[in-house]
Amino acid sequence: MMNRCWREDPMPPPDKLHKPCTGIIAAAEAAISVMASSAPSCVVHMETYINPDHSEAEHAKSYDAIISLVLRGVVSIQEVVLELGAYLITTDNAVRARGILLLAKLMMGLSTTKLVEPVVHSMAIFFADRLADWHGLQGALLGSLALLKRSKSVGAVSEDDAVRFVKSALENLHVQALTQQDRILCLELLESLLGTYAAAVSSLGSDLVYGVCAAIEGETDPRCLLISFHIVELLAHMFPSPEGPVADCAEDLFDIISRYFPVSFTPPPNDARGITREDLATSLQKAFVSTPFFSSSCISLLLEKLSSRLHIAKIDSLKYLGLCALDFSGKVMAEFSKPIWVALKSELFPSSVSNKGIFDVIPNNDQEIFNETIICLRRCIKAVQNQGDNPDRVNFMMPEIPKQELLSLILEDDSVGDLFRFIEHCTYSASSELMTDGNISPQWIVALINEEGATSKARVMIDILSAVAQASCSACSCVLEKVLQLNLTAVQESYSSQNIITEKRNISTWNAGSRQFANLVALLLSTKVVNAANGLAQDQAYTFIKTQSPVNIDEVVNKYWLEPLFVRAPDLVDAYVEAVTVGKQIILTAASNTLGLQYCQLGVDGLRGLATFPAPISLLSSDQVNQIISFLTSILLDKEQYDFIWNHVLKAFSSIIATEETFKDFGSPRTYVLDEVIPQLLKALVQSKGIQDVDANLQAISTFSASRPLVLERLLDNLGDSISFWLPETIVKSEPAGDTRKVESILRCISQDLLPLCNLEGGDQAAAPKILHSVWSSIEALPVSTLKYSEQIMAACMEVIRVAVQKCNAAVQEDVFSKALQTVADRVNICDKCNDSKAIAFSKKDICKQSIPTLFKLSSCYQKIQETWLIALLASIVIAVRPGLLYLQEKFFLKLFLDAALDKRRSPYTESAAQALASILNKWVEGKKENHLSSDLLTLEDAINFVLTSESISPVKSFMNSNGLENLDNSDGFLLSHKRLQGVQVLSWVGKALAMRGDVQVKDIAVLLLSILKSSDLELGKDPKHEGYRMNKESEEHEELTIAIATAAAEGLGIIIKESKALNKKHYATVRPLYKQRFLCSMLPLFFQALREVGNFERIWLLRGLGHLISETPHTALMSDVQLVLPLLLEALPALSKDSRDMNLVLAILLVLSSFLVDTHYGRNAAADHVANIVTRLIPLLQYQFSMTVRETVLQCLGAVVGLPYSRVYPLRMQVLKSLSAALDDPKRGVRKEAVRCHRIWMAISSK
Amino acid sequence: MASQLINANPVVHERKARSVRQPTSAHDDLAVEPIDSLEVFDHVRDIKDPEHPYTLEQLNVVSEDSIAVDDKRSHVLITFTPTVEHCSMATLIGLCIRVKLMQSLPPRFKIDIKVSPGSHASEVAVNKQLNDKERVAAALENPNLSQMVDECLASSEE
């Protein structure tokens, strides 16, 4: 075999080596003047590479050496070829193969290097020849591919050479006999030939087609298949002519690819190639539709496969059929209309129901197949209709539908006929032949209105009709004509007698009479069809807008296909309005309101459908739209009456607004909502008294705002105005009244729903400053020394200010800030005017230039400000501004907020002040030294020191030196310890700021907090034995304070790590990644050390601190320290379960514990060592009296314990079951349920 | 199990929607929510019928109305209706209900289980058997029986 192969080789024997007739060598000689000395280093590497005995690594190394030589221009490729010459034609198969491979690899390496034409040509000749060399095939294929993929700019293969390649490939390559690797290369070769050199290789004609058929037949590898399908596609595009070779052997070609349908392929696990079933299916589908010559066999195949029982075959057939329909010509589809309709119908109606009535319940189909069938049907109709869809023709008259076309088949189907006949009959006579007794079975209604699940023939027909209406303009026109002509009379007729029916009969028993049922059917049908037409119109208008200029859209868009709808639009509007009214009556009179609700929803849906026709296409007059909008508005403003339908109406409005937004720039834009609804809504808000009305209005406002930026702007504008109207009045009332609640709700709505929608970059930048302005100016206008005010309103104002400032750009923030400072300064001036004549004034520039002493004067004066909230409002601004705004003035603000945070008088706002302080430190911008005097410049370190060493914080420090209460027996001590309490809070916030920045000083603060915990030796709960000698009231108060300080310190550790509303990315804080993990890691060793040093009571405080710290850390971050943390958590549980104030902490610890117990990797491993400990600690908590949530979580944890190693869990079984039987008698139902579940889990382990 | 099904074609009823009951007093941790018939029904509704893949609720063997609970006096009376009169599975169903309730209710409860009057051929005998402590205990000692009970209870949680 080998010898034969060699003899057939067209290469000349070695002795003729230098004869010019051998292409490659000759070319090389021609290209260069032959040089005797080629680079010797190259030869060494070459020999290494050629030798098949060397290892892969050596091969790779030598190849790298050669290619770098060539790329650097040390050796030219021609020289390499000359050197290689002997290896390329040797009779040693292995060596020859390596030689060819080396050349091929070099060509791949040179893919972006320019080569002269003769070189490329000779290479092409060589590789095309080598395709016949069975031994060197892989190299030859790689080389050919590398050549064919060269782009024109670096010297591509000429067309003649491409033909040479094809000929050689067709002649020599027996693809099916090759290994998978080579097959891929072969197919890639064909693919790139067909793709890049289509014009040249098409001259080969039928040879090429046969060759391809032979190459791809029987392929099974997914990678090869992907290429094969693409080759078929390319081939089909190459020969579009009906006399061409593809047309001739279309049947064979399709036969080959049709075998893969439906694609069934499960990728192997951990498949690196990433080919999915979907990839294969898509490329096969592309091959199917590549040429019209496949169409008839393709459709027959798909219809045949559709009748298969295999789920995937059905789904794929439906998908392919739909997509094929869009690509094949309508003519072909028209030919197949009848079989397609029959096949699809049998999918929609299972054969067993053929003899059932149209309203009888039929078993529910597979929902996925049902949906796919509907989509497929729509596509088929679109394809058929598009064929004859001449826009001019539908303008003025209905197109004639040829018999046997899909559309006419559907419209003339028996079931459709039945449906229409039923509606007609029931409307004019009391009953029809469908139901002689006039009673409606409740299942009929359920089956009719169900969106999913059990359904009826009538419902399916309605779905089909709406799918048809959405398919194409002419189809929609036909359906509208047919449906509206029949129904309108039905809808109207039955309404006139509606009231009598509702009065006479009890609807809840469902014997509502056939007329009413027919009415519902008609309503459903018309609503669905109207909405389908609407969907089509939206699609059309949208694609039109995207592709064309908007100027003359009114003239260009063809809207006459909607004629039948708009002729009857007034009647439809009346009918839908009536439906809502009737539905409401039914709900009011009957106990069961499903039917009434259905009426209302259909009515609203219909109205929405009519109102959301895109403006350029809609033929509704503005009066008609106004009628619809005002009817819907009346529902919107009367939530009490229309509670059942209110949310539905809200949704309808959302989509109306969205339509207005989408088509705002086209034709005559609509602004009904903006002009009509919103003023009414705001008016209603102003007038509303009850809190429920206010909430409903605000809900509507936030929903509207989300739908359109313009609406948002308008609403914010108006709300800002009404705030400045209300705020001054309500804010001074300290007692919550109706108005106060209303204003508070409005403020919350602004800060939580509306402002977050504002886009910093968008056009609505003005909204946030405006709101800010109105809030601030109404606060500014408050009379001097306003001491009584509503705290809720103030808190809401603070939030609005914070969010609004955050939404402003830097310049506006600066403005706002200087204005706020001015207000504060004014107040100081007023307080101060008796003894100080010089007023402090601020302008915008002052923030930067004001000399420090002036500011300090302000800070010393602030003590005199009576309005404590002013500083708090200032704080909310500082929290939200960008870094750098306070540049150089930080010291003043640090002092201001530090004082404010430590001031007991300002107790509701100390936290805000502390947050502002933290915010300043967190956003600290280090200054440049050269621009300022060094004394002016405050570094971050200085600032932190300033805060920590200030006299206000130092009491905290002294606390840890003094031992508890001993130093506190004078009256000063009381005040001092209050300051300590505030100081701890300030410390924790400063700690958070530093931790987020990643500053090391956070450790100092943490140590401080820890030392407070370490020196707290008081018990949280009242200890009975202490009561005897602690009757003294003063010392009791001291004791309480000390406890409060320790609690604050423990919570402080939580604050440092907790997500905060004030300090986060949104508020421009500096956040270092993983700062929580870092902080936790640095804290844990400190905790362990502290725990070793202290006694029992202090230990509990430390555990509390640890609990706060851990419960706020992300659970994944804890997993690496489970071993250390778990025993401490278990120790903390019983210690903390005595006092109700620790309730949330206990819950948080339990949640951490449960996350350990379900973590299969670290958590369970660590927990396995503590099984008995966990269970004994958890069981007493089953009786935890303060919270049922804790008890439930305990039970969940106990359930999770079972997942730990069996041998350790089993011995505890009796103990757990015994305690669970007590939990079964828990007073709370939720706990009992959880106990039953847990009990079952523990019962089950016995039978393992 | 008998080679032939006793009721080969039972009527299957719709399952009732599982109402998630809001705690009567969410804020008050001390308020007591007494055990009522719906809660007991929740325990037994998902027990699987020994011969069909349906639950007792689907076969209408138990319903909320057929359960009487007196939380104060710690007493539960369940009346169940076998699907056919001569159902030999009645005792097994009763046994399943008893075992399930023994596991799910606090031990203070006395549980009475009866077939509804007139629904079974040997009503008195079945009632007697189901409420005899000794015989229930003996039945559960029987490995075959206890395995069948376990199977019926196994799917009771979805």
Image (spheres, coloured by chain):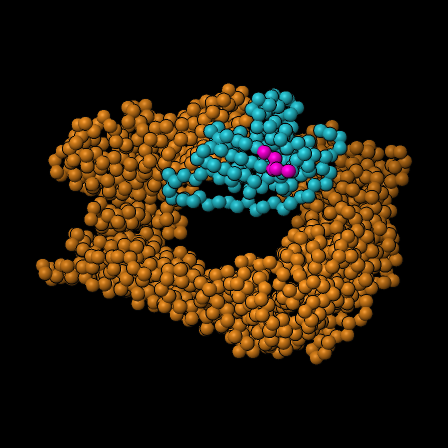
Chain colours: A orange, B cyan
When the figure is inspected, residue A845 is found, relative to residue A941, above or below; the finding is below
- How would you classify the magenta stretch by its main secondary structure? loop
Task: Please report the residue visible at 29 percent of the width from the left and 63 percent of the height from the top.
Answer: A727
Q: Residue A108 or A657: which is nearer the viewer?
A: A657
Residue that appears at 49% across and 25% down: A1217
The quarter of the rendered structure image containing the C terminus of chain A is top right
Q: Which image quarter holds the N terminus of chain A? A: top right
For image coordinates 34% across by 28% down, the residue present is A1135
Above or below B25: residue A1046: above
Count the numbered circles shown: 0
Question: Of residues A508 and A161, which is closer to you in this image?
Answer: A508
Asked if residue A789 is among those painted magenta in the image, a careful observer would answer no
Left or right, A726 with reference to B92? left
Q: Residue at x 78, y 36 (%)?
A: A97
Whether residue A330 is visible: no
Q: Which residues are magenta?
A: B114-118
Place of residue A126 in the rendered image (x, y in percent of width and height, measured from the top left): 80, 45
Q: Position of residue A4 (x, y in %)?
A: 90, 36
Q: Position of residue B35 (x, y in %)?
A: 47, 38
Question: Does A477 sit left or right of A1048 as displayed?
Answer: right
Q: Nearer the viewer, residue A1080 or A468?
A: A468
Return the residue nearer the eye: A877 or A970.
A970
Residue A17 left/right relative to A894: right
Q: Quadrant of residue A455?
A: bottom right
